[in-house]
Structure formats: structure tokens, C-alpha cells
């Protein structure tokens, strides 16, 4: 069931909330059980068999976690608990691997070795990548002693909570369960008002912003896939347009998830912090899909780096140390774990070369960024003049790097991605719609003079795309974001008002805001068209 | 070793790592207060501290240190 569908907004959500508040008035336990049931219905809606796939995995994970908990209580069981943890991780990775990667692996083997492995065309259970990551994190947390006790009900609400079930934000058990245990489970007008505001801001971002730019850039990607020769401006429109689409789509979804959770008195962690304003790639990853970055850093990158660093120093080799950093230390301790982590990130997004190259590319971006920091500190010791220059220069460089990498994420084939990349560096020439050349005169002569040629793209589509891109760029780069607007009411875990950065636009329970949110809601609901899936629901 | 002495050593380690001599660590300092103290430099800092003081932190602890004070507290426990 899509968050942006009428059956969700008009039937499922009101019914779930009504039941939750009614039961919550007498028993928190029953309110939470109702929420688990509703989440199962939500999950089963698209394909009921999904529940049969996910249920055994929940039971097995729960059993393994209980074993880990018991082993933690005993003495001298460290090795056994490590073995159980490894078994659990292997189970989850195999589970995900079967559904998500088996066809990709088979077709790659077929392509390389000319084998004839049969492709199974498995339908991916919804949100399996997100759910699997969260389950692995839970097992690691239990083994590390970060989770001390839990019941089956605790585990189910943690895994199945429908606002973040399909596409995150990826949460930690230790930040969620205390909230469920303390939730009043009753109607609370502040929670409901903040929840609706988040929900409708998110819906607006999805159905008005993302869904309007999407059909304008799709033809450019189709054109690139069909034969190519995408010219400079169109290629950049495709890259920037898709970056804006995925940003508004996924951050819109995340806002909706925060709003839905808030109805139940639950705060989810922040997933986006105006990432397109980032002034470096490192900064970008601290602001884009923040809960995934947090997961990858905490469970892959940090342990790997810690292990590599300790091992290297134990061997007596130089570590990573400011001015004295050697090339060996840089490659082994920085480049290697960074590229590996981003490779996993790419692969996690999807079984395809485009995603893998996208991840690797970001791994190299991050490596260059870290390397530059080392060099820059030597070349440019005056920090304030460095920051003055690097803020705008870094912003442009980051924006160009992020948008061009997004082409890999969106392109249906590697051939079309290569064609668009060629277009972006000008190898396919610069072209404008024919209309610019229809009236012979100064403009047409000048354009011809600088080598601009005419192409069959309609001037209306061209203008529409340019206008949408400008509007969305303005919103993404210059306007306060949803969480800044709602900062006074802690809209996400740990997001608090920072001395009113945007006092005029800070949301409050006032009549003008009620009218404004109603207008946004009406526009969003009126824009709900045919089925339009969130981009991240495929993962 | 007093808390202040530990903080002085921590400050020296981090200054060397980030090439920034204006850093001064206190018990309340958080990672986001120091420019460029990202997860990569955090792990490097932790391992440098481990070597300097001859201690070894648990991975789970490293993840959960909220501020510099938490690292100092855990370390004094390990040294005791």
C-alpha cells in the first residue's frame, strides 16, 4: 500500500489510528499489538505471500537473538556468541542474496562464461533490503551487549512498524523501544498536528515536486538508451533533474514516515538535512540518507577501519597520522575501507552494474576528499581564507559530482549512462530546440557562430524542464527544510530548535499555519494521480 | 593521571591528526564541534589513544561514546 494512495490515506491510516487510540485508552500492550497487526496488513496488501516470506525470517532472527542474549549472560561464551552472530549475519545475507541478487549473479555468469543458468525472475519482497539491514544491526547490538532484554512483541514492533517498514529511516532498537515503552498510545493534539504537517509536506514533495519533474526527464534517459547522442544541455538536465526527483521523492517519503510515526507518539531519526547544499562529498554523505550512512559507518566502515588500523600498527607499520601520513597508510587505511563500504552501499541499492559503479564512484570521491584535506592543510594553512574560498568552490564541485553520479543510478543500461556522460562533457555537441533557430536573425547567427546546433526537442518541453529545475533548485538550496520549519516541536529524534534560524517560517499551532498546511494538503491530494511508486520502495 | 592531563594528551593527538592547532578538547566536546572530525579521523584518534595509553576499547563502546568525556571516563576505568 503506497503512502501516496487514497486507500492508505483515507482508509488504512484513519482505521489504524482509531483502533490504536481506542485500545490505547485502556491498554498500551493491546494498542501495540493492534499496531503490529496493522503493520502486517500494510505489508501484505500488495502481495499477501510477502508475509509468509518475511515471517519465518522474523522468527529465526528472534530465536538467534534470544540465544545471543542467553550466551551474553554466561561466562566464557564469547566464541559461541560470535559464532551465533556470524550464523545470523550469514542467514540474513543469504536471505537477501537469494531474493535480490541470484538473477544478477546468474546472468553475469551466463554473460561471462556463456553458461545457461536459468533466471528465476523472483519478485522482490517489499523493503527487503531495509528490513534485512535492520535485523543484522539488531543481532550485532544484542551480541555487543547494547540490548539487554526484549520480548517477541518488542521485536515485532521494532521490525514491522509500518511507517518505516518499507524504506526506512533505518532505526536502532535502542532508540525505538524506549519510545514504544513510554508512548501514551492516546490521542495527543500536538502529535497529530505535527504528524499531519510532516505528512502533507512530504506528500507535497512527492506528488507535486518529484512526480512533475519525473516525466520531463524520462524521455531524455529513453533517448539515451535508444540511440543516444544526447547533447550537452539535455544531458545536464537529465542529471540535475533526476537528482532533484530522487531528492524530493525520498526526502518526501522520509517526511511522511516521520509524520506517520508521530501520530503514534514516536520520533524517527532524521534522514535528510538539505544534502544538495553540501560543500564537500563527506558533508554530502552526512546529510543524504543519513540513517544509511550511519548504518554503513557503524557496522561496516568503523569495524573494518579499526581492525585494519590496529593490525597495521601491531605490525609496526606507520598509521594514519596527520603530516606524516604515508602513501601506504593512505591506501590501506583510507582508500580501501572507504571504497569497500561504498561498494556495499551501491550493491545494497540494487543488483546492477549501474548501482555498483555509482557506489564505487562515491568511494573514490570520498577518498579524493580525504586526500585533499591532507594536502589542503599543508598548502593552505590559513583556515579562514581557505573556508571562504572552499565553501562556494566545494559546493559547485560537490553538486557536479553528485548529479553526474546520479546518471548511473537512473540509467536503464550502462550504454545509456556512458552516452549521457559523454553528453555532459560536451562530446555530443551543444544543441538547442529548433525554435531558437526558426527566426533568422542575430540570435540564430550567434548560436551557429559558437557551434550550437538545432535539435528536434520541443521548445515547450525544454522550457518546462528548465522552469521545474529552477524552481526545485530554489526550494532545495534556498528554502528552509521541513525539519527546520518544524524544529520547535522536535520533528525527528534529536532535531531541536537552533535559536530560531528561520523565525518567520517556524511552524506553530496557529490559524495561519493551519490554513497554509491545508492549502499544501489540498494541492497534494489533488495531484495524486495514477500509481506512482516511491523510488526507494524498490530496494 | 588527572583528567586534565588526559585531555591535554587527547588534544595533542587530535591536533596532529587534523593538522589544526586551534583545537582544545574539554570533557563536553562532541565530534561535531570540531571541524573535519569525521568517522575516519575518529577511529584514527581512538587507535592513537589506545597506543598512547596502552588500552583497548570494545567496538561497541567506541560506537557509543557521546563526547570526549565519555572516552576519558572509559579510559580511566581501563587504566585503573
Image (tube, grey):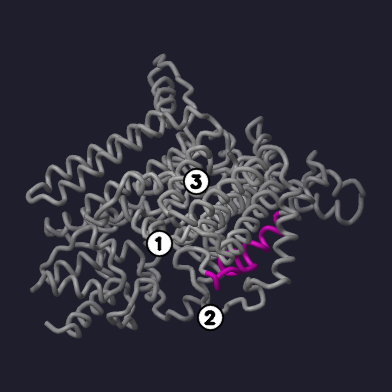
- Residue stretch in magenta: A469-489
Q: How far apart are marks 3 and 1 (CA)?
A: 19 Å
Question: Do the residues at discs 2 and 3 belong to one chain?
Answer: yes
Q: Does the magenta stretch include residue A9?
A: no
- Secondary structure, mark 1, is helix
Q: Is residue A281 visible?
A: no
Query: In the image, what residue occupies the spot 53% across and 80% down?
Result: A499
User: What percent of the width, then of the height, locates residue A507?
Assistant: 63, 71
The total number of labels drawn is 3
At horizontal 86% and vertical 55% (from top left) the residue drawn is A443
A58 horizontally vs B75: left or right? right
Q: Quadrant of the N terminus of chain A?
A: top right
Q: Can residue A532 be seen in this view?
A: yes
Measured from the top left, where is residue B26 in percent x and y? 29, 82
Of A318 and A282, which appears nearest the observer? Answer: A282
User: Crowding near pointer 2: few (<14 within 10 Å), some, many (20+)?
Assistant: few
To which residue does mark 3 refer? Answer: A162
Rounded to the nearest whole Å, what is the CA distance between mark 2 and mark 3? 33 Å
Please give the chain letter of the residue carrying mark 1.
Answer: A
Q: Residue A499 carries which label?
A: 2
The residue under the point 79% across, 52% down is A449
Amino acid at each position: 500500500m503506497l503512502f501516496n494512495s487514497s486507500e492508505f490515506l483515507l482508509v488504512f491510516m484513519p482505521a489504524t489510528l482509531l483502533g490504536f487510540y481506542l485500545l490505547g485508552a485502556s491498554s498500551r500492550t493491546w494498542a501495540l499489538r493492534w499496531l503490529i497487526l496493522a503493520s502486517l496488513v500494510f505489508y501484505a496488501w500488495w502481495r499477501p505471500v510477502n508475509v509468509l516470506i518475511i515471517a519465518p525470517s522474523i522468527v529465526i532472527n528472534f530465536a538467534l537473538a534470544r540465544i545471543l542474549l542467553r550466551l551474553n549472560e554466561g561466562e566464557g561464551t564469547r566464541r559461541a556468541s560470535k559464532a551465533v552472530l556470524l550464523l545470523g549475519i550469514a542467514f540474513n545475507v543469504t536471505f537477501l542474496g537469494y531474493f535480490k541478487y541470484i538473477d544478477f549473479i546468474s546472468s553475469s555468469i551466463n554473460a561471462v562464461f556463456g553458461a545457461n543458468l536459468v533466471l528465476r525472475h523472483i519478485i522482490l519482497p517489499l523493503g527487503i533490503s531495509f528490513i534485512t539491514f535492520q535485523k543484522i544491526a539488531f543481532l550485532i547490538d544484542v551480541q555487543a551487549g547494547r540490548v539487554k532484554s526484549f520480548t517477541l512483541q518488542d521485536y515485532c514492533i521494532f521490525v514491522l512498524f509500518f511507517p518505516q517498514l518499507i524504506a526506512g529511516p533505518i532505526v536502532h532498537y535502542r532508540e525505538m523501544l524506549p519510545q514504544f515503552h513510554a508512548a501514551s498510545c492516546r490521542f495527543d493534539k500536538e502529535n497529530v498536528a505535527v504528524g499531519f504537517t510532516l505528512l502533507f509536506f512530504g506528500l507535497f514533495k512527492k506528488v507535486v515536486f518529484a512526480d512533475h519533474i519525473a516525466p520531463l526527464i524520462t524521455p531524455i534517459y529513453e533517448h539515451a538508451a535508444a540511440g543516444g547522442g544526447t547533447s550537452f544541455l539535455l544531458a545536464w538536465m537529465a542529471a540535475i533533474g533526476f537528482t532533484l526527483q530522487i531528492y524530493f521523492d525520498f526526502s518526501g517519503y522520509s517526511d511522511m514516515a516521520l509524520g506517520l510515526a508521530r501520530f503514534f507518539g514516536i520520533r524517527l531519526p532524521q534522514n535528510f538535512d538539505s544534502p544538495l547544499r553540501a560543500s564537500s562529498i563527506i558533508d554530502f554523505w552526512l546529510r543524504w540518507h543519513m540513517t544509511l550512512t550511519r548504518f554503513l559507518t557503524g557496522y561496516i566502515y568503523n569495524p573494518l577501519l579499526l581492525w585494519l588500523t590496529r593490525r597495521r600498527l601491531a605490525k609496526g607499520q606507520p598509521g594514519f597520522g596527520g603530516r606524516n601520513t604515508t602513501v601506504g597508510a593512505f591506501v590501506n587505511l583510507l582508500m580501501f575501507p572507504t571504497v569497500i563500504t561504498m561498494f556495499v552501499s551501491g550493491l545494497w541499492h540494487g543488483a546492477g552494474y549501474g548501482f555498483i559503479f555509482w557506489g564505487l564512484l562515491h568511494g573514490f570521491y570520498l577518498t579524493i576528499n580525504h586526500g585533499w584535506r591532507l594536502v589542503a592543510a599543508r598548502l593552505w594553512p590559513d583556515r579562514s581564507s581557505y573556508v571562504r574560498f572552499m565553501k562556494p568552490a566545494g559546493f559547485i564541485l560537490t553538486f557536479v559530482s553528485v548529479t553526474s553520479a546520479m546518471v548511473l543510478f537512473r540509467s536503464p543500461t550502462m550504454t545509456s549512462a556512458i552516452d549521457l556522460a559523454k553528453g555532459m562533457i560536451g562530446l555530443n555537441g551543444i544543441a538547442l530546440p529548433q525554435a531558437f533557430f526558426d527566426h533568422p536573425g542575430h540570435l540564430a547567427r550567434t548560436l551557429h557562430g559558437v557551434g550550437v546546433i538545432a535539435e528536434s526537442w520541443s521548445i515547450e518541453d525544454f522550457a518546462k524542464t528548465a522552469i521545474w529545475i529552477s524552481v526545485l533548485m530554489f526550494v532545495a538550496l534556498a528554502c528552509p527544510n521541513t525539519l527546520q520549519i518544524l524544529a520547535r516541536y522536535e520533528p525527528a529524534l534529536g532535531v531541536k530548535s537552533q535559536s530560531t534560524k528561520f523565525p518567520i517560517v517556524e511552524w506553530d499551532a496557529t490559524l495561519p499555519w493551519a490554513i497554509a498546511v491545508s492549502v499544501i494538503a489540498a494541492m497534494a491530494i489533488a495531484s495524486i494521480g495514477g500509481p506512482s511508486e516511491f523510488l526507494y520502495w524498490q530496494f | 593521571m588527572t583528567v586534565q592531563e588526559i585531555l591535554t594528551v587527547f588534544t595533542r593527538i587530535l591536533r596532529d591528526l587534523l593538522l589544526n592547532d586551534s583545537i582544545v578538547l574539554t570533557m563536553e566536546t562532541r565530534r561535531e564541534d570540531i571541524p573535519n572530525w569525521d568517522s575516519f579521523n575518529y577511529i584514527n584518534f581512538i587507535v592513537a589513544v589506545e597506543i598512547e595509553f596502552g588500552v583497548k576499547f570494545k567496538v561497541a563502546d567506541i560506537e557509543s561514546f557521546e563526547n570526549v568525556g565519555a572516552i576519558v571516563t572509559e579510559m580511566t576505568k581501563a587504566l585503573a
